């Protein structure tokens, strides 16, 4: 299905948010996730189904002021 | 030192982690400054880039308190979601709450700020709101659950120092028991000393150190100034007066004319 990951269109096989993290290469990374503007805690990623057109944000630690 | 949500800090120096010439210089600046709080953020990262992971490992190695921000957020909803993401990634209830309302000055949207502060405080966050010296907004933030306020000195990154001395002095006097942090706008150590002398509990800065010719040396200069200002405030400064008052005793002076 086609989704949007961090603002870019992406064709994926994953059916859940957890599976998408693996498919997109985030295994083992400290990141936070949001689906369509809503925070999805780490503990709920495996139960979070994805549907076509979903907007997913995967954020990592970054420098800041 | 004042307690920030129950955490006693060894000094009043909070330092940002952005814009340094290199990670090594950032680490050096923290080492020489003794800054006890580091601000950080969250940004998009691809699965194949590990820059964020490396950055986080370096920050953890500094051994300082981490204060994540919601920089760049323009609505309460966006800031609240970002705060939740930051809490999970950085493992802290602390959040530097920024909701920007105007691009030229990065003036906070104080209405959205109060709304987000209330939502986050009710959800267990310990909110450090980036605000102005507006007393009414400050009062609303305290009523929303904030136990710390962070008024700007001047617009972020401007290096202008304390733009509204009267307003900041009034804020300090109006909220004597609230930990107050001057956040943003400082360009020189003397301005940090001035803030501490006025009784502020800490300063938060980034650009003034990161963009200095020698960031680590500037970090140390700020640390010394913050320490000097804190000592002066604790020592009880004299009251200024309009007319001269001789410091050398007048009694006993010889009559030589």
Image (tube, helix red, strand yellow):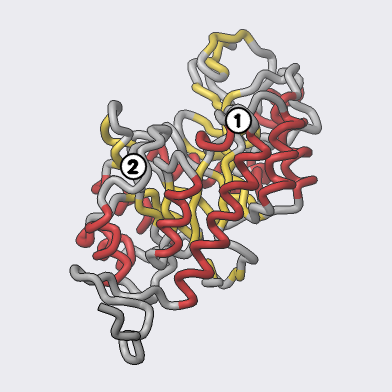
Q: Is residue B236 above or below residue B199?
A: below
Marked residue chain, label 1: A
Q: Is residue B227 left or right of residue B217?
A: left
Tell me the residue that label 2 is attached to. B154
Q: Is residue B29 above or below residue B253?
A: above
- Could you say where residue B14 lies in the image, as x and y percent from the top left? 56, 51
Tell me the residue that label 1 is attached to. A59
Marked residue chain, label 2: B
As helix, strand or loop, the secondary structure at mark 2 comes to loop
Q: Nearer the viewer, mark 2 or mark 1?
A: 2
Q: Is residue A11 above or below residue A16?
A: above
Q: Where's the N terminus of chain B, which quadrant?
A: bottom right
Q: Residue at x 61, y 37 (%)?
A: B17
Q: Nearer the viewer, residue B132 or B11?
A: B11
Q: Residues within 10 Å of mark 2 (few under 14, many from 20)?
A: many
Q: Nearer the viewer, residue B43 or A5?
A: B43
- Could you say where residue B166 lies in the image, as x and y percent from the top left? 23, 58
Q: Nearer the viewer, residue B239 or A56?
A: B239
Name the outermost residue toward the bottom: B252
Q: Residue at x 27, y 42 (%)?
A: B109
Q: Nearer the viewer, residue B4 or B243?
A: B243
Rendering quarter of residue B249: bottom left
- Could you say where residue B250 lies in the image, as x and y percent from the top left? 31, 85
């Amino acid at each position: 299905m086609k989704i949007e990951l961090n603002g870019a269109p992406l064709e994926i096989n994953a059916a859940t948010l957890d599976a998408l993290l693996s498919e997109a290469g985030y295994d083992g990374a400290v990141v936070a996730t949001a689906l369509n503007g809503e925070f999805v805690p780490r503990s709920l990623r495996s139960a979070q189904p994805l549907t076509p057109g979903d907007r997913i944000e995967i954020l990592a630690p970054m420098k800041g002021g | 030192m004042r307690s920030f949500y129950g955490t006693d800090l060894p000094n009043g120096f909070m330092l940002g982690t952005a814009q340094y010439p290199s990670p090594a210089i950032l680490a050096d600046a923290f080492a020489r400054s003794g800054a006890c709080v580091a601000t950080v953020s969250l940004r998009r990262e691809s699965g194949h880039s590990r820059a964020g992971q490396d950055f986080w490992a370096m920050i953890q190695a500094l051994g300082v308190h981490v204060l994540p921000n919601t920089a760049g957020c323009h609505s309460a909803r966006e800031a609240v979601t970002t705060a939740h993401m930051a809490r999970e990634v950085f493992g802290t209830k602390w959040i530097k709450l920024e909701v920007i309302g105007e691009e030229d000055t990065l003036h906070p949207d104080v209405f959205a700020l109060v709304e987000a502060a209330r939502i986050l405080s009710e959800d267990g966050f310990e909110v450090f709101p980036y605000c102005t010296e507006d007393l009414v907004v400050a009062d609303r933030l305290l009523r929303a659950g904030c136990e710390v306020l962070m008024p700007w000195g001047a617009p972020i990154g401007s290096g202008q120092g304390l733009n509204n001395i009267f307003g900041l002095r009034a804020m300090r006097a109006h909220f004597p028991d609230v930990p107050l942090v001057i956040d943003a706008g400082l360009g020189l150590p003397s301005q940090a000393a001035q803030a501490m002398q006025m009784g502020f509990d800490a300063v938060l800065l980034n650009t003034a150190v990161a963009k200095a010719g020698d960031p680590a040396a500037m970090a140390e200069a700020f640390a010394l100034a913050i320490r000097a200002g804190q000592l002066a405030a604790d020592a009880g400064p004299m009251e200024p007066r309009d007319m001269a008052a001789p410091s050398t005793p007048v009694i006993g002076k010889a009559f030589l004319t």
